Amino acid sequence: MASGSFSSCVPLLIGLLSLFLSFSFTFSSSSSSSATNLRLTIRKPAVPIFNEAPAFRNGDTCSLASSSADFIHVVMTLDANYIRGTMAAVFSILQHSTCPENVVFHFLWLRHDPDVFSSIQSTFPYLNFKVYRFDAARVRGLISKSIRQALDQPLNYARAYLVDILPADVKRVIYLDSDLVVVDDILKLWKVDLGGKVLAAPEYCHANFTSYFTAAFWSDPELAKAFEGRRPCYFNTGVMIMDVEKWRRGGYTQKVEDWMQVQKQKKIYHLGSLPPFLLVLAGNIMPVDHRWNQHGLGGDNLEGKCRSLHPGPISLLHWSGKGKPWLRLDSRRPCSVDHLWAPYDLYRTSRNSFVE
């Protein structure tokens, strides 16, 4: 065989070997029979395999970050079910950042998962990141059943506990969901002036705010007084800039928990971790340009039907809702907006894993 032909077959041989090693063989014998049974089971990898991302370096205008205050701190959760989305989000941030080496990622997970950890390291060998455990016991007794099971997971509530998780020298963070991609320089979002507020996020005052709470809430005069003195507007908690110090001093974690306790008794909302944030902060945040959260691309929380983009400039695309782009693409029934996510997908499919 010519050397060129042999080298072209190497990726195929490696792929076949990997497939063979993913099988497990179990032999069993019975005293009543001399026959030996062979059982073949196929074990899927716990974590998908991803292509290695290129190294991203700072531009000439970037200063070298030397202290915590010099870095852009991005917080995301780590869940094996959403790891493909997380990888795409990280990749998009680095690709569009002027100073990617000045971005540090803080990942939150429920338990140590060596497969997930090694997957991040192998996909982004140069990534500056830290991982922290979020104790699910903090919220397990406070979570109420919502309209979609995915919204009831403890990690969804970790964003309210950042002051108890992150190092003390991290004073300000950008919190991002895992089902989004950033198509602009994240430094622009980092530089948003909080104007003395604890939180900044895109506000949507045209949304029907009353729909986020039940009739039981609005019919109770004491509960409805929660918004007195405020002009509350809906905001999505999947994209937020947070002043961690102000959150701590204001005791906002306790305020969120207090409303979760009320929910356990009176069922005043249906949407998981979002309504407590609205109850505590709606009408008292710094508004951010809508371009930083083109949300709802995953459709609603029940059916996840396709939606089109809203008019206007876009810096961040967010597949909030039931439909996730990687699932719809894999099912060969993608929405048109899912093709905007696909270029950031580092997932190594069974087809391209055999080809360099």
Image (cartoon, grey):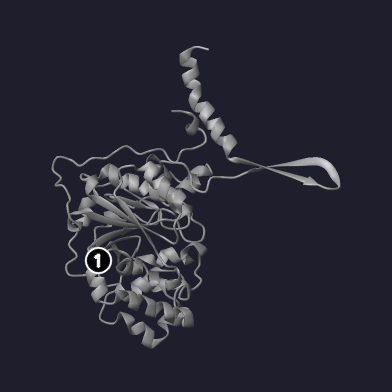
In the rendered image of this protein, does residue 252 appear above or below residue 306?
below
Q: Residue at x 47, y 82 (%)?
A: 266
Disc 1 residue crowd, few under 14, some 14–19, many 20+, Cα 10 Å: few
Q: Residue at x 53, y 27 (%)?
A: 13
Position of 34 relative to 142 (above/below): above
Rendered position, 138 above or below 309: below
Q: Mark 1: which secondary structure? A: loop
Q: Residue at x 42, y 75 (%)?
A: 213
Q: Residue furthest top?
A: 2
- Give x and y (percent) for residue 325: 45, 48
Q: Looking at the picture, how far across and down is residue 160, in whole percent?
A: 35, 69
| Most foreground residue, 65 or 345 | 65
Image side of residue 24 versus residue 91, left or right: right
Above/below status of 338 relative to 229 = above
- The residue lying at 27 percent from left, 54 percent from top is 291
Q: Residue furthest right?
A: 32
**Picture coordinates of residue 283, whole percent (x, y):** 27, 73
* Image coords of residue 297 (percent x, y): 41, 53
Q: Name the residue beneath numbered marker 1.
A: 168
The answer to whether residue 288 is seen in the rendering is yes
Q: Is residue 161 shown left or right of residue 38?
A: left
